[in-house]
Image (cartoon, rainbow, N blue to C red):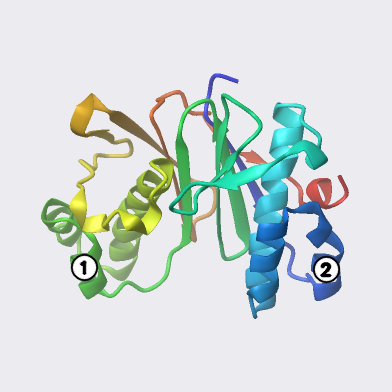
Amino acid sequence: MDKILVFLMKLPDDLDIQLINDKLHLVDHFKRERILQLNKLQDKARSLFGDLLMRYVIIKKIGIPNNEIHIARNKFGKPYLSNVNGYEYNITHAGEWVACAIGKVCVGIDIEMMTHVDKSIAKIVFSNEEYDWFINQGQESNVIMDGFFRLWTMKESYMKAIGTGFHTQPKSFTIPITSGEALILFQKESKFFFKQYDFDPKYKLSVCSMSNLFCETPEIVAFTEVVHK
């Protein structure tokens, strides 16, 4: 598995708390406790089934049974496989979708459902160069949403790839955004590559890695395939 692989799963509309409770035993204790602390059904579902999608992918692609998947977390909270060398994964979810990326180098993935954008938020989270690019995209609401979430998902996927999350300030780095791909050159000559996937017109999805070998399209996994495994 030399490429960065991306998997997507759409959650059904008729989820109920009983199904969630029935599947909680399949995740680790830390994750289970986090899910139980969530109040909204959809938040519980996204968190649980995002984790189960990751486990499905690891079982399918690496061949490790679920009871041998051991998750640890770095000092910033990013989870990783503690007993499997040579593989990295990352999970994201928004709206009715959960997604997982997996590869042999660091990887981050972010999905966002596009909604109305307050331009003042862009001023807070984008660097000066990024903000200049953003405000020059146009004034139509759909153009503003597209530009904001296109750039934001790349930024967040990078913060997740390096394992720091929001401990890295979004304004502290600049993505040299282009027509669809981007390359970031950071200190110590590190290179981070990006891939964006169009799969649903209401969403943006970006993946970041130190490898530029991305799969061409995400694999859509049926909800029933994951739930009944």
Q: Callout 2, which amino acid?
A: Asn
Residue carrying label 1: 124
Residue that appears at 14% across and 58% down? 136
In the rendered structure, the answer to whether residue 177 lies left or right of residue 203 reads left
Asked whether 212 or 20 is in front, the reply is 20
- Position above or below: 31 against 190: below
Label 2 environment density (alpha carbons within 10 Å; few <14, some 14–19, many ≥20) = some
Residue 6 horizontal/vertical position (percent):
57, 38
Q: Quadrant of the N terminus?
A: top right
User: Residue 123 location, x and y as percent?
Assistant: 18, 67
Horizontal and vertical percent position of residue 102: 57, 34
Above or below 36: residue 168: above
Picture quarter with the C terminus: top right
* x and y, in percent, of residue 158 in the image: 36, 44
Looking at this view, name the residue that lies furthest to the top: 2
Give the foreground label among 2 and 1.
2
* Separation of marks 2 and 1 at Cα, in angstroms: 39 Å
Report the label total.
2
In the drawing, does residue 95 fall left or right of residue 25?
left
Is 164 placed left or right of 34 in the picture? left
Q: Residue 54, can we see it?
A: yes
- Tell me the SS state at disc 2: helix
Looking at the image, do the residues carrying marks 2 and 1 touch, with CB atoms under 8 Å apart? no
Q: Residue furthest bottom?
A: 39
Tell me, for residue 21, which label it has, or none.
2
